[in-house]
Image (cartoon, rainbow, N blue to C red):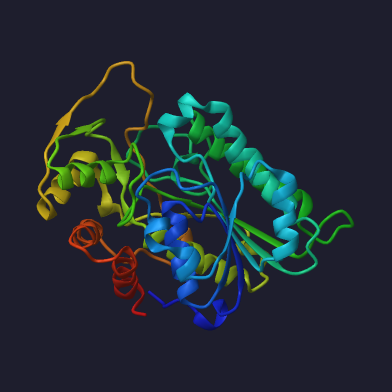
Amino acid sequence: MEMINRNFWKSKKVLITGHTGFKGSWLTLILTEVGAQITGISLEPVNSPNLFDKLNLIENSNIQHNILNIQNEKNLREIFNREKPDIVFHLAAQPLVRESYEKPLETWNTNVIGTLNLLEATKSFEHKCLVVIVTTDKVYKNREWGFGYRENDPLGGHDPYSSSKAAAELAVSSWRSSFCGELEYQNPNIYISTARSGNVIGGGDWSKDRIVPDFIRGAAKKEKIVVRNPNSTRPWQHVLEPLSGYIKLAEIMDSENKEFCTEFNFGPNLSSNRSVIALLDKMNNCWPAKWKIEEKKNSFHEANFLNLRIEKAFNCLDWSPKWDFDETVFKTINWYKLHYEGKSAFECCLDDMNSFYKF
């Protein structure tokens, strides 16, 4: 895998929404390490502990830190007009399937209207701006089969989260077709792509309703954890994998070739499509824990089978995943073990970044 193009990122003005989240914190750290100037827009971190606070990114990385709901169009536009970013990574979202059932309108408003608010904020830019909108592998109409989904497969979504992300994809495509171009009412300076990635794992995630954080809490406290849907299959990948794809996509979009303004899947190799119970067994080899399986009837619907085809990213972007399933799980659990033994989150992340990118 090619290293990050440091010359490209040095002094680039990058705006990241959702920078206080798990993926957003990793992305912020990576880009500050290669010299980018980061502006973040996000809500306060939901969980305590959380990676953003553990990394102390506001002080350590000197980022422009803004607490703002992306549904606030006026204030969002003010920040965009003030900062005039060269590149935007849009990660802010309501990301949980179960919470989307409890707060469906909040989920749709955040994931659809919030995304359109962001695009509207770029509408009057007179400089080139590259926008990478991050969605999810769950945007596809899931037929519960073993075949991987390609970028041109039908969109869908059974639950509010999945459907809101599929709707965001449609909204972005429509906005790009309508307002990006050379016509009088269009802006030729805006380049927009969407990135669809699967279930990411990695050090520093303490979110609720996620299997790895639940496992870590149980292992650390020597408590038995509850496991739902043990036979569900997911495309597990280390968080650095899709982030490397988003970064590579932005670099290539800078070529001003509109053919890259489209949708891309960033998933693992097929061998990393494993069941939840297989993930638990592999984690247990690294850090023993105990769990009990509770498959509740009449619970919220969640997909059983899901994986992505990634030929498009390989052929168009020369991108491919680097770590296999075993190394992904080892790197993830080892991060937590080292951190709980006293190593700082910053050092743990740098270790993984150095291993992945060969900084």
Rendered location of residue 29, percent (x, y): 44, 67
Relative placement, left or right, of 286 versus 244 is left
74 left or right, relative to 169 = right
Can the viewer see residue 79 in this picture? yes
Image location (x, y in percent) of residue 311: 43, 59
> Compared with residue 57, is residue 200 higher up or lower down, i.e. above or below?
above
Q: Where in the figure is residue 281, as x and y percent of width and height?
A: 13, 45
Judged from this view, the residue extending furthest toward the front is: 59
Say if residue 318 shows up in the picture.
no
Q: Nearer the viewer, residue 147 or 342?
A: 342
Q: Residue at x 31, y 50 (%)?
A: 236
Question: Residue 210: where, in percent of width, then height?
Answer: 32, 41
Q: Residue at x 44, y 31 (%)?
A: 99
Q: Judge by depth and name the residue closer to the eye, 192 or 287.
A: 287
In the rendered image, the quadrant that contains the C terminus is bottom left
Residue 274, by quadrant, is: top left
Residue at x 36%, y 43% (from the top left corner): 207
